[in-house]
Amino acid sequence: MRRSLLLAAGLQLVLATGGSCSTSLVTREGLLKLSDADWQSSVSKGAWLIEFFSSKTKSSDFLPTWEQLVKYKASLSTDYPNAPFNFAQVDCSISTDLCVGEGITETPRLFTYVEGSKSKTQYQGKREYLDLVSYVDREAAAFRKLKGVSDEPHPLPSSKPATSAKSPAAGDAAGASPAAPPPPAPTAPIGPVSPNQAGTLTKFGSPPIPDDAALERFLSKESRQGPSFVKFFAPWCPHCKAMAPAYQKLSETLKGKVNVIEVDCVAHRETCVKYGVQSFPTLRMFNNGRATEYRGGRSHEAMLEWAIKAGSNSGLKEIGHDDIERIAKDHDVYFLYLFSPETPQREQDIVEEASSFLMSKQTYAFRTSDATLIQRYASYLHVSKSSSPASAGAQSGLLVFKDHNHEVPVSRFYPSSISSTLSDEKAVQQVAAWLNAERFPTVSELIGTTFADVIYNDAKALVVLAALSDVHHGGNVVGTGSGSEERALELKLFEKLARKWRSSSHPKVKEKILFAWIDADRWATAIKTYYKIRPVDVPQVVLVEGSRLQYYELPSDSPAAARGRPWLDEASLFHGIEAVSQGRVRAKSSKTYIDRGFEVAGGAVASIVVTVSRHPWLSLALLVVFAAAFFSFLRRVAANTQKDRQPLLPTASNCKLD
């Protein structure tokens, strides 16, 4: 919380002892601080960014950012001696008179000074490193323009002791501007190469990626350099430091598979701004011209598994009939594209392109033209009736299997049924939409990394969400041992009903329905905040409409769980879902009080804007009347309190600065 400088000064006077104010306060070592003694002589020369702070208040959160800013932007002073841009601080708990004289009433504050003149407004942006760097660079460039100084760095030559006589030529060379760097060597044509051949971490800013143009070429689809996993980081970022060893190791384990690159956003700020980096670290996979952000764990194993999948050349992996049982064992959900040799290449390319959507997801897809598998799943495939002799009789189909099953697919899609008049782009979108809708397990578990993906799914499907606990069962509290067994039984029943829903038809329900469960012990606060589910209510089930931030209560019998009876009834649950779909159940908001407050405020502002636009003169008249009444009130208050007002600030005679 920001504290008033007036109050801080008053407290300083009260706490002072003797006849002087102590200046032995906590200071920020290693950073330039100005006081009354050197203020005018300093800020009158060059441009300055000044932080007014108070060491008596807890405002240290900004300190690391300020230190990095001063450290990495010191060149704005040394590289431009004729138009230097400097950084300094003023501790207003010590230099109170100085701060008052500069009109500083609260701390912390940031102001720019140009040759002694203070900017009209304080810095209004975010106190984040990249935002401050952008601001400082703009101000420094404006000052150089004002002074007629080139943007080309021209630091003063280093002064060296004259140990021997120099030739005139040497003297001329010493006083000259540094020689321009040689032009970069012509870029060799980029051919097909194996990514990360050396198994090393590539640092942006040095070969083979010395600049932005080289990075853009390297990451482009045309470069044929293969997939690249890129980390945008800052050296001072704690999370970046923590993951550095794992990322270094990743470059070794991804040898020959994926390029591993890092970009220092302090040294290369403009590059990170260009790529839209908002936080550190930011991890992205660039593959075939597409960028996919990584949001998983930062351990070596987690990043490795994701990078191999996201960095593959295709969302589809070729398999044979011997692989299918192993795949089913390893994957709860997987897609299988089967096609006979007669299948048109256009269809294969469309499925291939659409499957790239899955490369950044947890779901896997496979392809095969294996005769044994085509025969096994022939009843689930579409037989082409094309008039073309080449594709007549072609068999193909996209199948999705769930629950580690490889016998019967739960759903199918026929790319061959897509109209031939549809563009390739539209056809790809159709296939990708089906993959996106079917990629969820029969029952998903909601955790930190899956909550948004399921609840706010792109298909806008409603989610039947079960809150299950190891401890709480129908109002009874049991030990975690037996409680875990009870939760397993509750989940088993929920999964059974989810499969029953999927296998039966529901003509009264127009929305797609997903099923998910959440650990009511681990996420107790979240489910209480969003869905009003308390521990005593568990097990409980609700129907969530994430796209509209609302939910519906569904019938369940929590006390039955305590008696060892089923806590869900199939008929009641399915009827409840149908009632919601038909609009017979009232929705409840899953928004927090803050969300609702912003929504109400936004609506109020919108109403005011509409009213003003429709009745401008009436609005102006009301505003004038309100302002007159308000200022009249202030004058009366000021007149009544003027006699009792006491000064809060110490005068020069009250406080002697050590």
Image: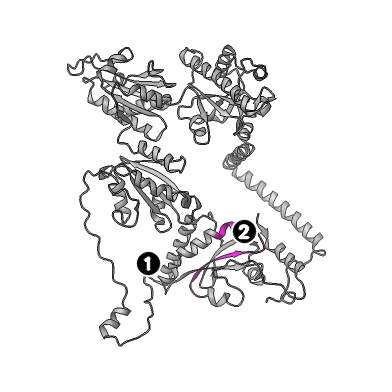
How far across and how far down the image is residue 413, in percent? 35, 20
Please name the residue that numbered disc 2 is placed on: 59
Please name the residue that numbered disc 1 is placed on: 151
* Rendered image quadrant of residue 393: top left
Q: What element carries label 1?
A: loop
Left or right: where does residue 169 sit relative to residue 488? Answer: left
Residue at 40% x, 29% y: name it.
363
Q: Which of 301 and 459 is in front in this view?
A: 301
Q: What element carries label 2?
A: loop
Given this view, does label 2 or label 1 mark the residue nearer the observer? Answer: 2
How far across and how far down the image is residue 535, in percent? 66, 29
Left or right: where does residue 108 sit relative to residue 321? Answer: right
Around disc 1, counting alpha carbons within 10 Å, would you say few (fewer than 14), some (14 to 19), or many (20 or more)? few
| Chain part drawn in magenta | 45-63
Does the magenta portion include 208? no
Position of residue 446 relative to residue 652, above or below, is above
Position of residue 291 relative to residue 500, above or below, is below
Which quadrant is the N terminus positioned in?
Answer: bottom right
Question: Outermost residue toward the front?
Answer: 481
* Rendered image quadrant of residue 165: bottom left
* Rendered image quadrant of residue 157: bottom left
Residue at 33% x, 14% y: name it.
380
Residue at 67% x, 22% y: name it.
474
Res. 269 visible in picture:
yes
How far across and how far down the image is residue 323, in percent? 32, 24
Q: What residue type is labelled 2?
A: Ser
Res. 541 visible in picture:
no
Position of residue 225 relative to residue 585, above or below, is below
